[in-house]
C-alpha cells in the first residue's frame, strides 16, 4: 500500500531524532527531549527530522501534563505548518504534513479542553474539519479526538454504505431495541486481528442480546483488488465473527474517527452512544463494556 509504505519510509528516516526524543519522554524527561530537538535545529535546521521531533515533543508535553508548555509548542508547530501551507503544500499530497497537522490540532484541542472545557475544544475541531475536507486520514484523526470529547450520550451517526461484503446489511435504525457494538477495523491491522478470538467468544455469549457489526473502508484507488484482499483477510482471519455484517463506508469511518484501529463504539437500545473506545480491549474489558444487556 503506497500510503503505508510512505509513512514507514518517513518513520525510518526520522528515527535518528525521534528515537532519543521518545526515550526521554518515556522517562518523563521533557526538558531533555526539547534539548535534543534544539541541538538538531542548530546543527541541521528545521528539516523533516526537526518537524517530526517537534511533533513528538508537543505530544509528549500533553502526555506529561505540561499544559502551558504544550500550548507553546503547538503554537510553534502550527506556525511552521502554516508556512508550509502558504508555500503550496497540502496534506492531501504530503503524508508527513498531514500527520504533523493532525498532531498539532489534536494537542490544541486537548489544551483547550483542559483550560476552558469541552465546548471550545469541540468548536475548534469543527472549524479545522471545515477547513480540511481532505484527506480522510486527517479527518478521521480529528473526529476521533472530537468523539472522545462529545460523542458519548448522543445519537450514533448514521452509516452511509459504500457497499457491504455480507448480504442484507442492516441500518443502525433497524437494530434498535438492543445494544449494538460497532467494531472498526482495517484489513492490514494486526491489532484488529488480535481482538478476533475474544470478540468471537463475546459474539457467541451475547448472541441475540447484542448486535455486532463490523466497519471498514477502502484505502486504495484500486477498489476491485482491495475488495478481493478484504474478502480474503476476512475469510482467513475473522472466522469467529462469521455472520456479523461487514460494512464498508469511508464517510462513517471518518465520522467515527477510526484512525486508530481497532475502534469500539457501543450503542444502547435507543441508538445512543454509551462508549467510544479507539484502542484495543482485553476480553475482560469487553465483558465489562457489555455488562448485562
Image (cartoon, rainbow, N blue to C red):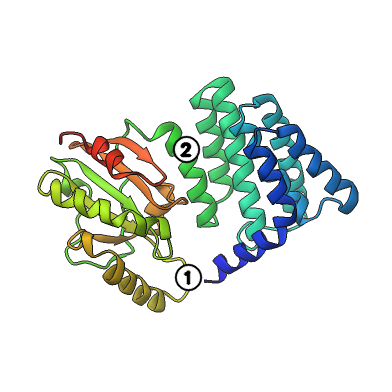
Q: Count every numbered label the image shows and give the total.
A: 2
Task: Give the image location of residue 285, x and y in percent.
Answer: 30, 39
Task: Give the image location of residue 176, x and y in percent.
Answer: 16, 42
- Per the model, the C-alpha gap separating discs 1 and 2 is 26 Å
Q: Are marks 1 and 2 in contact (CB under 8 Å)?
A: no
Task: Give the image location of residue 171, x and y in percent.
Answer: 22, 52
Task: Give the answer, above or below, for where 26 lies relative to 8.
Answer: above
Secondary element at tag 1: loop
Residue 243 or residue 26, whichever sits in front: 26
Q: Is residue 133 visible?
A: no
Q: Earlier in the sequence, mark 1 or mark 2?
A: 2
Task: Give the image location of residue 18, x and y in percent.
Answer: 70, 50
Quarter of the image that includes the C terminus: top left
According to the picture, the residue beneath numbered tag 2 turns out to be 146
Secondary element at tag 2: helix
Q: Residues within 10 Å of mark 1 (few under 14, many from 20)?
A: few
Residue 230 or residue 270, whichever sits in front: 230
According to the picture, the residue beneath numbered tag 1 turns out to be 220
Q: Residue at x 61, y 27 (%)?
A: 65
| Extreme residue toward the right, this view | 43
Q: Is residue 139 visible?
A: yes
Q: Residue at x 16, y 63 (%)?
A: 168
Task: Give the answer, above or below, for where 50 lies relative to 57.
Answer: below
Q: Residue at x 16, y 45 (%)?
A: 210
Residue 76 or residue 201, whichever sits in front: 201
Q: Name which quarter of the figure residue 191 lies in.
A: bottom left
Amino acid at each position: 500500500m503506497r500510503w503505508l509504505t510512505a509513512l514507514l519510509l518517513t518513520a525510518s528516516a526520522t528515527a535518528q531524532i525521534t528515537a532519543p526524543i521518545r526515550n526521554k519522554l518515556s522517562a518523563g524527561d521533557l526538558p531533555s527531549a526539547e534539548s535534543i530537538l534544539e541541538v538538531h535545529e542548530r546543527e541541521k535546521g528545521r528539516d523533516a527530522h526537526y518537524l517530526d521531533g517537534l511533533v513528538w515533543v508537543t505530544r509528549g508535553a500533553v502526555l506529561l501534563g505540561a499544559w502551558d508548555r504544550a500550548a507553546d509548542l503547538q503554537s510553534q508547530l502550527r506556525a511552521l505548518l502554516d508556512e508550509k501551507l502558504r508555500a503550496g503544500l497540502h496534506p492531501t499530497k504530503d503524508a508527513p504534513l498531514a500527520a504533523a497537522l493532525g498532531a498539532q490540532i489534536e494537542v490544541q484541542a486537548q489544551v483547550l479542553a483542559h483550560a476552558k472545557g469541552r465546548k471550545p475544544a469541540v468548536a475548534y475541531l469543527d472549524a479545522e474539519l471545515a477547513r480540511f475536507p481532505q484527506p480522510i486520514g486527517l479527518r478521521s484523526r480529528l473526529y476521533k479526538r472530537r468523539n472522545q470529547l462529545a460523542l458519548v450520550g448522543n445519537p450514533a451517526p448514521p452509516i452511509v454504505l459504500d457497499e457491504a461484503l455480507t448480504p442484507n446489511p442492516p441500518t443502525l435504525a433497524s437494530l434498535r431495541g438492543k445494544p449494538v457494538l460497532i467494531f472498526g477495523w482495517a484489513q492490514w491491522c494486526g491489532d484488529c486481528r488480535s481482538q478476533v478470538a475474544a470478540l468471537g467468544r463475546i459474539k457467541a455469549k451475547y448472541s441475540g442480546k447484542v448486535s455486532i457489526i463490523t466497519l471498514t473502508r477502502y484505502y486504495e484507488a484500486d477498489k476491485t483488488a482491495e475488495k478481493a484482499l478484504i474478502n480474503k483477510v476476512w475469510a482467513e482471519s475473522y472466522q469467529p465473527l462469521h455472520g456479523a455484517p461487514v460494512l464498508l463506508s469511508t464517510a462513517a469511518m471518518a465520522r467515527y474517527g477510526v484512525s486508530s484501529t481497532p475502534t469500539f463504539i457501543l450503542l444502547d437500545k435507543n441508538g445512543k452512544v454509551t462508549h467510544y473506545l479507539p484502542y484495543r480491549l482485553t476480553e475482560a474489558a469487553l465483558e465489562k463494556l457489555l455488562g448485562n444487556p
